[in-house]
Image (cartoon, helix red, strand yellow):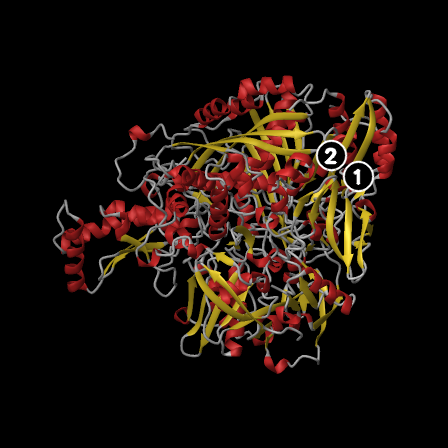
Amino acid sequence: MSNAAKTRPQTRIVGAPVPRKEGIDKLVGRAQYVDDLTREGMWYGATVRSTIPRGNIRSITFDPHIDWNEFTVVTAKDIPGKNHIELIVADQPCLADGRVNHCEEPILLLAHPDRHKLLEAVAAIKVDYDPLPAVFSIEESEAQKEIILGEDNLIKSFTLEKGDVDSVWATAAHIVEGEYRTGPQEHLYIENNGMIAEWSAGDGITVWGSLQCPFYVHKALRAVFDLPDEKVRVIQTETGGAFGGKEDYPSILASHAGLLAMKSGRTVKMVYDRMEDLAATTKRHPSRVRHRTALDKDGKLLAMEIDLATDGGAYSTLSATVLSRATLHACGPYVCPNVRVRSRAWATNHVPYGAFRGFGAPQAIFAMERHMDEIAAALHLEPVELRRRNFLHQGNRNATDQLMREPVMLDKLLDRALAESDYPAKRARFARENQTNPLKRGLGIAAFYHGSGFTGSGELYLNSLAGIDVTADDKVRVLVSNTEFGQGTNTILTQIAAEALNLDFSDVTMAPADTAHIPNSGPTVASRTSMVVGRIIERASLQLLALLRERAGLGEQYPREEFFAACNRYRAAHGKVESLCRYEAPPGIQWDDATYHGEAYGAYAWAVYVAQVAVDTVTYSAEVEDFWAVQEVGRVLHPVLAMGQIEGGVAQGIGFALYEKVVLENGRMANNQMTNYIMPTAEDVPPIHVVFEEIPFCYGGYGAKGIGELPHDGPAPAILNAIRDATGVPFNAIPLLPEDLFAALAAREPIAEPAAL
Amino acid sequence: MSSRWASIRFTVNGQSRTVHAPPMKRLLDVLREDLHLTGAKEGCGEGECGSCSVRMNGELVNSCLIPVLQAEGAQIQTVEGLAPAIDSGGALHSLQEAFLQCGGAQCGICTPGMLMAAAQLLERNPHPSREEIREGLGGNLCRCTGFARIFASVLAASTHAGSEKKPDAR
Amino acid sequence: MRGNPEAHELIAPGSLAAVLHLLASEPGAWTPIAGGTELMVAHAAGRLTARKLVSLWNIPDLRFIRVEANSIAVGAGATFIDLRRNAAVAAELPLLAQAAGWIGSIANQSRATLGGNLVNGSPAADSSPALLAYDARIELVSIRGSRTVPYDKFHTGYKRNLLAPDELLFAVHLPRRFARHRGYLRKVGTRRAMAIAKVALAATALIENETVAEIRLGAASLAPFPTRLYRTEESILGNAITEETICAARTAVLAEAAPIDDIRSAAEFRRRVAANLVEEFLRELMKPEPRP
C-alpha cells in the first residue's frame, strides 16, 4: 500500500489497523444514537414551517377543533435572548418573526407527549402570508432587481490577485474560456438530525444530539437563551453520519428543542423524519465558475482569470467561509504567474446552503479540472501532458504566493495513477472499440490539492485547547471537542495518545463529548482533526510524560503498570492528572486576510484520480466502471480507516457527478424522499483502487495531513473528463443525468433514425 | 380513532414476546419502543435505505414497512440477536468480527441493517461473488464507506470458516 | 412517521374465503394490504387514506406457484422472492424471473407480491412488461365466482383497473408456449438497485422463415399504465428484420408512446429510449439465435 514504509518512523499503534474504538458498540446494536434515547415523561417537538419562499406573515390561525391547551406552543416572542443563530453574521432568525425568507423556514414550535397528535396539530395551524417576489438563482440575485439581503444581495466577496493578469491577454498564444456549474448536493447522512433538550432554572439548558461541533451549538444556545457559559451544556450522542451537514444546523435544532423544553418544563425530543430533513436542512452550495486562461505556445499557464459565484441561500450562515475555501482552491495545483479570482456568494430565497465535505473546494476543482481538459483539447495536447507541464513542485509558489516548502510529488502521483489504471493502453483500446460498440468508454483524470485545517490565520484564531487526563481507574482519556461521526476521530486520537505514552491501545479512551467536561479544541471540520488536533494530543501526551518524569518519578523506560503508578503518585500530590496544550502554528506562517496572500493552509494533501466511465448510447446512462484514487496525505495513521475515507468520499463524488439532483420548485426541494433523491447504491459504486504515497508532515499528528475532504474533490471532474473522452462532448454541469446526456447526444441524430450502434 | 389494539405474539431473537399495540403500528416501532431493541434504525421510513432491516421467518425485510399484526407468530431476528451473549463476554458473530477487522462500519447507523442483509446473503449463499454481494446489499444504503470495506467484510466472513487467513484489510 | 397507526384498522382473517366474505359484506370499505411495500410507504408519509385494511399476507390460498398443463399459475400472494426461487419460472419465464429481481431490493422482494404490484397499477410497475410479453391472463375472484381476463385489459386508467369492489386478484396465468420465442428485457432506471423505471421493455418474438411470426412488446412508464406497444408490433409483424423494419418500428414507438414529464425523467427522453430499446431488441433478432 505504501512505498514509504521503509522510511517511516517505528511506531507500534500509529499506522496499525487497530479495531475502531467504538466499533463493537456499533456492531452489536448497543451504540446509542439520539433517537434511541428516551427520558421519563418525555415530550416530542415539531416545527411549523414556511410554505412560501418569501413574504410577510399576515396571520397565524389555530384550528379550534384541537385542544391547544394540551400543547406547548413557542413563537419568536418566547425567546429569552437573541432571536438569531450565532455563527458568522447574526442574520438568521431562530424563529421567523413576521417575515420569511425561504421555504421551510421555522415559524413556530409545538410540543406534545404524543408524537402522532403533534403532526395533526402542525397540519391544523394555518399561516397566511403577503408574498413578496423571490430570487431563485445566482443570475437573478446578481441582477439585483429584487433586493432580498443587505443592500446588494451579496453575502460575501473575495478578490485574490497575483501578478498582472491584464498584461497577458494581448500577447498570449492561446486563450481558452469556459463556464462550469455544480448543483446542490444533499449530505444524506443516514441518521436524520435530532436533539433532546432539558431545561431547569438552576442548571440552565442541556442538549443531547447528533452533531459535529459541540461548541458551535454551545455558542448558539448561549445567545438564544441569554445564559452564561456554565448554564449551557451540549452533549454529542453517537452520530450517524454528518459530512458537514451537522456543522451548523444542530444549532438551530438545539435552540428549538431547548425553547420547547423551557416553556413546557419537560424533556423534549425533536427528531426530523427524512422528508423534513431533506427539505429543511442545508445542502452543498450550487456554483457557477467562469474561467479565462492564457497559455504560451508550449502550453504553460500564463494567466488565469476566474469568476466564481455561489448560491448561498437566504441567510449568511457559512457561505463566506465556504466561498473562501472555493477561492483558495480555484486555481488548482498549478504554477501560474498571473491570477485573478473574483468570488461572490449571492443570497437567494433557497434554504441556506451549508458545509459539505470539501467546503467549496469540490465546486472550484470541478471547474478547474474540467477546464484543463478543454484547454488540452484547444491546444491539441494530451490532458496528462498539459497538467504535467504546469504542476506545482517544491519551491514553487501557488496562487496565493504560498511557497511550497514541503516536497510535492504530483508527478509521481500521476505516474502511479496512469500505471495503476493502465491508462495509455486502455485509452487506445477504447478509442478503437468505441467506433463500433454502443457502449462508449473513456478515461478521465483530475489532479488537485486540498488544504488541511482552517484557512490562513483561522487556526490561530481558534486557539484550540486539547489534551489528556488519567482517571483513578487507570484509563487515559483524550479530552477534545472533536467528535466521532464515522470518520474515525475516536480511533485516531486514542492511537496517537497510546503511541506517545507507550501504552496499549486499550488503555486510552475518549472522554465523552460533553461541553461541561472537555476543552474547546475547535470544530470537527476542514480535515483538521488528525493533523491539527492529533498534533496537540501528541504534544500533550509528551508533556504529561515529562511531567511524570519530573514530579512523579517515572523512569525513561517503563512498563504500563509503572506509568499508572506514577499517575497515582502524581494524583495523590496534585489532585488530578491532566495535560492540556494549545495549538502552535508551524513557523513562518504569514497570511493576510485583506489581500488573500500568504500561507493559505499549513499543509496540502495532493491527489491524482482516474475514472473509467462507460456511456450507453441506447439508454444515455453513464456508469463509472472503475476508479483509481492515488494520493499523498502525509503519514497514514490507520490504513483501513484511511482507505474508508477515500472510498466513501469517492462514492459521494460519484453521486455528486452522476446521480444526485436536488429538484427545486419555487424554492422548495420537490424530491425530498430517498426514493427520489438518488444516491449510489452498492450496485452503482465501482471498484475503487486506493493508493497512498506518504510524506510525513512534521507539524501534523504523527506526520498526518488532512484526508477527510480530499476524496470528494476529484471524482466529478475525472468522471466528466472521462465522458468527454468517451463521447467527444464537453459536459460542463453536474449533476449530469441521463436526460442531460440525451439532450446533447440525441440532438446529433434525427429522432426516427436508428441510434448509432 | 378506529383502531382496536391487538395482542400480537412472536419470537424475537429466540425469545417469545407478546405486545399489545395498534395492528398498523410498524414492526420497527414495536421493536424500538415496546421491546427497547433499538438496533434497527429508521433512515427513511419508506423501505429505501434498509437501516431498519431485520430477518423475519428466514427472509430479509424492512421492518418499517411491516404492520405488526403481520408479524403474528413470526420468528424475528435483529442485530441484537447476532451475538446474543456479547454482554456476558461472548463472542461476536463472524460477520461482526469481519466488519470490525475490515472497517465495514464507520458511523454505524446503517450497520445493524447491513449486518442483517449480509447474514441473509451468507445463509443462502455462503460463498457469494462480488456481484452477488453487491446485489445482496443493494437495498442497504451506506453514505460513509462507499461500500468497499463492507464488501471486504462480507468476503472475509464468507471465507472465514476453515481458513487461517486473517480477513484482508484491502 | 407521519401516519397515526391508531387511525387505521387492520384485520387478518387468515383465509381467502373469509377475506372475500368481508369484501362482499361491505363493498369498497376494506382495502387489502399484502406485503405493505406500497401502502406502508403511504402510511409513513401520512398519505394513507384507507381507514380499514384487511391483510392478505401469507394466506396460503393466494401464495402459490403451480405448473399446470398449459400454463404456470402464480398466486397473487406470491412474493418476488418466491418467483426468483422457482425453477419452473426460471426455466420457462426467464423474463419474469429477471424482472422479479428488479423490484427494489431483497428486503422488498421478500414482501412485495405479484398481485400487489399489479393492483397498485403504477405505470412503472416492474413485473408488468414481462407479463405483457408473455401474454398473461389474470384471474379475479369474489364470492360471486371467478373470471379470467387478458392482463392487457386489466388496467383501465392511471391507477384504475377492472376489479369490482368485492373482488380480489387471485392469480396470474402464464401460457407455457414461449420456449421457441426470443426474449428481451431491459429496465432504464434511476440507478442499478432500488430504482423506479424511467422506461422498461420486455419483449418476446417468434421468428419463422426469417420473418417475425409473433411479437409482443410490453412497456412500463410510456403510458398512464403498463401497456403493449400494439402499433409498433404491427409495424414489425410479418416482416423480416431489416433496416427498414427498424426505422418503421422506431417511428411507430415514437408515435405510440405517451410518456410524461415527472420528477424522475422527461417525456422526450422516455420516448427516445423506448425507441432505442425496441431497436436493440430487433438488432438482437437479426443475429443468429444463441444456442444454450
Q: Which quadrant does the N terminus of chain B fall into?
A: bottom right
Whether residue A619 is visible to the viewer of this picture, yes or no, is no
> Residue at the location (43% across, 39% down)?
B158
Asked whether, in this view, residue B91 is left or right of residue A447, the answer is left
Amino acid of disc 1: Glu
Q: Quadrant of residue B136?
A: top right
Which residue is nearer to you in this view: A471 or A482? A471
Residue A393 point in image, percent of width and height = 44, 27
What residue is shown at x 50% (from left), y 49% (from top)?
A243
Label 2 with label 1: CB-CB less than 8 Å: yes
Pinpoint the chain carrying mark 2: A
Q: Quadrant of the C terminus of chain B?
A: top left
Q: Is residue A452 above or below residue A165?
A: below
Q: Where does label 1 land, which residue?
A: C268
Viewer-nearest residue: A295 or B160: B160
- Label 1 neighbourhood size at 10 Å, few (<14), some (14-19), many (20+)? some
Quadrant in the picture for residue A642:
top left
> Residue beneath label 2, please?
A742
Name the amino acid, label 2: Phe
